[in-house]
């Protein structure tokens, strides 16, 4: 039996980091996906006693005997169940880390460890100790702020949950999950994100699961209907970074300066709410005026992100370069490198700015904003 699932990456238009501390944020799905294919072997097949993980885009394969997995990961059938998402305890995470270490990841791929741990946790909790080959392929750059971690958790969980759906309409292409399964999927994916991010807000897995554009605050989701064209240039600085470390850095700053950081988070909350209102507004305001307001909000959000300590010299270079072309930019995701968003007001010709950014070694692309969430295919 084979099941396929895919889940999109995302951009955060406003509110990253502050959202972890209870502020509002606005995010949208983009049309770059992580794909997961799940294959269960027949009794007679080779490998019917193994769990195999293939990371196609980085040409790596990992394989565990199920006996070894069973020995390492404690499984309590009275508390473990696909319908009740549970957090991975520190003790279990340590046992899982040993299973990952045994695979001798190449030194330059050590950053994959948390993703592989998440895979083992979600797989064993949702499917149990059954043999399978799981193939993962991602169009998203890793650790760049476009939510590859959430797309992995959402696509993987979608495939795992879909494998036990009895009503499988084969050959009918990609289809979305129903609301109940979508909520379950999102809750499991959040548990996966916890392993990778430490303390995620849940915005990334939510927008990857539901798609479109959302306003998100402390787990409350408002789906946004955009009433204006919204074009963004995405520039990957190619500076690698790690969301967990950056989120933890902001939290530490908040402990050192609680009053200041609360004011910063409150200001970000207002920016996100105003941005969401502009995007949805059906009033007479012209598109140009709306774009001017969004520009200003992005500029202020970037200033606040800088005060949180998550900007980076590469991000500042992108901002300065785009300003020369009268365009406004802000980092997206955790910052510290990664990707930068540049608003492209109606009629903007991007060729010159892209040429200048790429000549500095950055990678530019545009992505369609606000598309599909998680989908499965049988
Ligand atoms: N397809 C994948 N396979 C394995 N691990 C992945 C995959 N996609 C993401 N990850 C994990 O997520 C981490 C990147 O997540 P993170 O630092 O949150 O950045 P982002 O979510 O912006 O890409 C990687 O280091 C890796 O551990
Ligand atoms: C910084 C944060 O707001 C977004 C992180 O996104 P990413 O992993 O950098 O794509 C963290 C979170 O909301 O969980
Ligand atoms: Mg992430």
Image (spheres, helix red, strand yellow):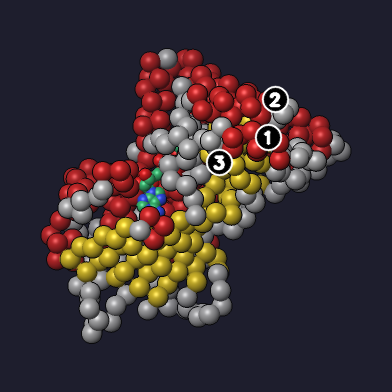
Q: For mark 1, does the 10 Å Cα neighbourhood hold few (<14), some (14 to 19), or many (20 or more) residues?
A: many
First reached walking from the N terminus: tag 1 or tag 3: 1
At 43% from the left and 17% from the top, the residue drawn is 258
Q: For mark 3, does the 10 Å Cα neighbourhood hold few (<14), some (14 to 19), or many (20 or more) residues?
A: some
Residue 165 percent location from the top left of the image = 43, 73
Residue 315 percent location from the top left of the image = 54, 28
Tally of numbered tags: 3
* Residue marked by disc 3: 363
Query: Taking 288 as reference, is 1 left or right?
Result: left
Q: Quadrant of the N terminus?
A: bottom left
Nearer the observer, 181 or 244: 244
As drawn, the residue found furthest toward the bottom would be 44
Q: Looking at the image, can residue 269 be seen?
A: no
Considering the numbered disc 3 on the image, is that residue within a helix, a strand or a loop? strand
Disc 1 to disc 2: CB gap under 8 Å: yes
* Residue marked by disc 1: 353
Q: CA distance from mark 1 to mark 2?
A: 9 Å
Q: CA distance from mark 3 to mark 2?
A: 18 Å
- Asked if 150 appears above or below 67 in the picture, the reply is above
Query: Taking 200 as reference, is 91 left or right?
Result: left
At 45% from the left and 56% from the top, the residue drawn is 138
* Residue marked by disc 2: 324
Q: CA distance from mark 1 to mark 3?
A: 12 Å
Residue 296 percent location from the top left of the image = 70, 26
Q: For mark 2, does the 10 Å Cα neighbourhood hold few (<14), some (14 to 19), or many (20 or more) residues?
A: few
Considering the numbered disc 1 on the image, is that residue within a helix, a strand or a loop? helix
């Amino acid at each position: 039996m084979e099941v396929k699932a895919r889940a999109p990456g995302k951009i955060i238009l406003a509110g990253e980091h502050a959202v972890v501390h209870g502020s509002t944020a606005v995010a949208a799905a983009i049309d770059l996906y992580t794909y997961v294919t799940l294959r269960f072997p027949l009794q007679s097949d080779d490998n019917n006693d193994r769990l195999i993980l293939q990371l196609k885009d980085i040409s790596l394969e990992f394989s565990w005997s199920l006996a070894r997995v069973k020995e390492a990961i404690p499984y309590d059938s009275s508390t473990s169940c696909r319908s009740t998402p549970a957090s991975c305890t520190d003790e279990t995470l340590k046992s899982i880390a040993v299973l990952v270490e045994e695979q001798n990841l190449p030194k330059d791929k050590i950053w994959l460890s948390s993703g592989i741990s998440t895979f083992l946790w979600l797989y064993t909790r949702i499917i149990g100790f059954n043999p399978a080959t799981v193939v993962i392929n991602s169009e998203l750059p890793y650790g760049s702020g476009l939510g590859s971690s959430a797309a992995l958790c959402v696509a993987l969980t979608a495939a795992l949950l879909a494998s036990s759906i009895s009503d499988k309409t084969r050959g009918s292409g990609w289809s979305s999950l129903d609301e109940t399964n979508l909520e379950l999927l999102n809750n499991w994916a959040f548990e996966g994100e916890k392993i990778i991010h430490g303390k995620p807000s849940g915005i990334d897995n939510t927008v990857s699961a539901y798609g479109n554009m959302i306003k998100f605050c402390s787990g409350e989701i408002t789906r946004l209907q955009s009433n204006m064209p919204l074009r963004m240039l995405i520039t990957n600085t190619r500076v690698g970074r790690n969301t967990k470390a950056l989120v933890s850095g902001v939290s530490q700053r908040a402990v050192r300066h609680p009053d200041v950081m609360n004011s910063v988070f409150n200001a970000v909350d207002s920016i996100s709410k105003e941005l969401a209102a502009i995007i949805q507004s059906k009033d007479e305001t012209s598109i140009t005026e709306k774009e001017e307001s969004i520009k200003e909000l992005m500029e202020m959000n970037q200033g606040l992100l800088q005060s949180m300590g998550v900007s980076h010299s590469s991000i500042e270079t992108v901002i300065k370069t785009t300003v020369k072309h009268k365009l406004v930019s802000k980092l997206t995701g955790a910052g510290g490198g990664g990707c930068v968003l540049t608003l492209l007001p109606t009629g903007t010709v991007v060729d010159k700015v892209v040429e200048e950014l790429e000549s500095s070694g950055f990678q530019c692309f545009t992505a369609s904003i606000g598309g599909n969430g998680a989908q499965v295919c049988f």
